[in-house]
Image (tube, rainbow, N blue to C red):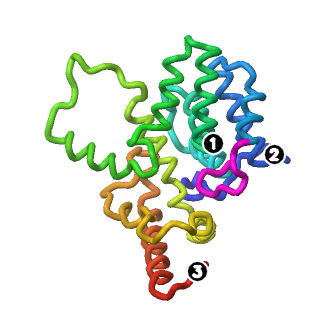
Amino acid sequence: MNMVEWWTRSELMPGEHDGCAASRMWRSACYALEVPDAQQLWDRIAKESPPDSLWHSLRNCVAYQNLLIKGVGDVTQPGPFKMALVLRHTPTDVAVELMAEMLKENPEAVDLTNYVVTLLTDDVSSCGGCLARAEIESSSSGSDSTSSEDSEPAVPQRDLQIFGDLELAVLSASREEYDAHAKLVRAEYSKLTQKNYILNQLIQVPKLYQSPELECFEALARENIDREILTLREHLLTGQHD
């Protein structure tokens, strides 16, 4: 498989749309965590999730899953990892309620629940967290960050890196796909001022993708970022809008 083509390749069953594929992913995750009423919980997700969201859309969710299947090595907890992918594309308040309900139904799954919550909230795995990653690596490079008193992390560093890289993977779509996606995202976030865009910060990060599996996305992602920054600057100077 050509990893760079991940965004345009769909792993849907015949006749299946993105919502059904995401639902299948959710049921698989719930089975791994022994969560009852998976369908009822999914119905809430589908009802509460904004249908017109571009950045955290069901299509993105399924695309990340496809990428995970096709090119990324195993994570330590595949089921909870899939659950975090779905909840990443779910309104925050709904995700918090669902996690609380699942923990109440299955208190013994506290470690797995912590794994999901950490993926969703840790700076290293968040989209903007690539800046934090660079700072963490810089500050820890000259010191010993381990000790016998250190507790076991809820999520291994590699899993956090993969989750964060998946969040940034859209930056490496083909030029045509990226430009079409970026135009829709700009429309969705049209109320933001130019200075609120994170792209200028991204180009300052020495390395966007931390996992070896997604390193191949680096050059194309930077090309897309540079091109969009030029587009945004042109819009700023001319007052043009998409």
Q: Amino acid at mark 1?
A: Thr
Q: Nearer the viewer, mark 2 or mark 1?
A: 1
Q: With respect to residue 123, does 192 lie above or below?
A: below
Mark 3 residue element = loop
Whole-angstrom CA distance, mark 3 to mark 1, is: 29 Å
- Residue identifier under label 3: 241
Name the amino acid, label 3: His
Frontmost residue, 166 versus 116:
116
Q: Which residues are magenta?
A: 48-58
* Secondary structure at numbered mark 2: loop
Mark 2 and mark 1: span between their CA atoms? Answer: 20 Å
Is disc 3 surrounded by few (<14), some (14 to 19) or many (20+) residues within 10 Å? few
Question: Which residue type carries mark 2?
Answer: Glu
Query: Residue at image x 52%, y 30%?
Result: 116
Circle 2 is placed at which residue position?
16
Sequence-first disc among 3 and 1: 1
Residue on which disc 1 sits: 90
Q: Does residue 89 appear anywhere in the picture?
A: yes
Horizontal side of 167 relative to 133 (left or right) equals right
Q: CA distance from mark 3 to mark 2?
A: 35 Å
For mark 1, does the 10 Å Cα neighbourhood hold few (<14), some (14 to 19), or many (20 or more) residues? many
Q: Earlier in the sequence, mark 2 or mark 1?
A: 2
Q: Nearer the viewer, mark 3 or mark 2?
A: 3
Camera-side residue of 192 and 89: 192
